[in-house]
Image (spheres, rainbow, N blue to C red):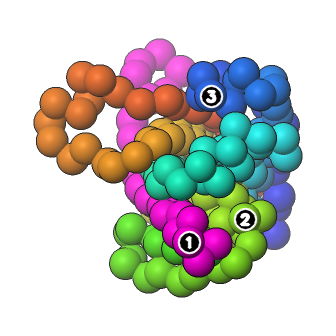
Amino acid sequence: MVRLLLLIAMAMPAGFASAAQEAVELHADIEPDVIYCDVQLGQNLDVLAATLKDGTQVTFSWTVKVYAVKPYWFDSEVASVRIEHQVVPDLVARRWTMTDLTTGIHRRTDSLDEAMTFLTRLQHFPVIDRSLLAPGRNYRLEIQLQEVKGEIERGWWARLWGSEQTTGTLVFSLP
C-alpha cells in the first residue's frame, strides 16, 4: 500500500476563513484494488459550531475527481464522485440528525463534535478502482467542498448564486 500525504492551505469558505486560516489534510491510499482518500478540514471550526448551535442546518457536498494529467493538453477526467452530508439540529432535544444524502442513511447524536466530524471529514473513502488507471502515469486527485447553510436549493439557478467553496489537489502516479 502506498500512502500519499499533502498538507495544503486551501481557500477556505468565507465563514470559516474569518474564524481562522486553516490547513487541510488530504491523503490518498493506493491499495492493490482501489484508491481511497482521507480528507479533514482544520480543527478550529468555531463558526461551524456556532451555526449548528444556532439551529441552522448545514450541508457539505464533497466532489472528488480524478484526472489523467496530460503534459501538452487539457487533463481528462477519469472519475467523479459526489458525497453529500447534512446535519440538522434539533434545539429542543439538543440532538443533531446526521444524514448521508447520497445513500439516505441517517442517525442521531447528542454530541456536537460527532456531528461536526461527520461534516468535516471523509475517512477511507473509495474514489476509483485501480484497474481503471495506467501504471506509471500521473493523475490528479481534486477535492471540492461546497458548504450550504440552510435549505439546499436544487434548481438550475442555484449555480448562479453559488455557495462557499473549498478546493484542493494532490498529484500521484501508480508504481
* Disc sitting over residue 112 in the figure: 2
Closest to the observer, 65 or 148: 148
Please report whichever mark, 1 or 3, sits nearer to the chain's N-terminal start. Answer: 3
Foreground mark, 1 or 3?
Answer: 1
What range is drawn magenta here?
Answer: 68-94
Q: Is residue 1 magenta?
A: no
CA neighbours of label 3 inside 10 A, class few (<14), some (14 to 19), many (20+):
some
Relative to 82, 9 lies left or right: right
Name, please, the residue furthest toward the left.
Answer: 156
Q: Label 1 amino acid?
A: Val
Under circle 1, the secondary element is loop
Q: Residue at x 39, y 68 (%)?
A: 101
Q: Is residue 166 above or below residue 54?
A: above
| Quadrant in which residue 123 is drawn | bottom right
Tell me if 70 is positioned left or right of 11 in this view.
Answer: left
- Residue 119 located left or right of residue 164: right
- Count of numbered badges drawn on the protein: 3
Q: Residues within 10 Å of mark 2 (few under 14, many from 20)?
A: some
Residue sitting nearer the eye, 112 or 61: 112
The amino acid beneath tag 2 is: Leu
Q: Identify the residue at image location x=50%, y=50%.
A: 56
Q: Quick one: label 1, few (<14), some, or many (20+) residues within 10 Å?
A: few
- Quadrant for the C terminus in the image: bottom right
Residue on which the image places disc 1: 92
Three-letter code for the amino acid on which mark 3 is drawn: Gly
As measured in the structure, the alpha-carbon distance from the residue carrying label 1 to the one carrying label 3 is 26 Å
Q: Position of residue 15 (x, y in %)?
A: 62, 28
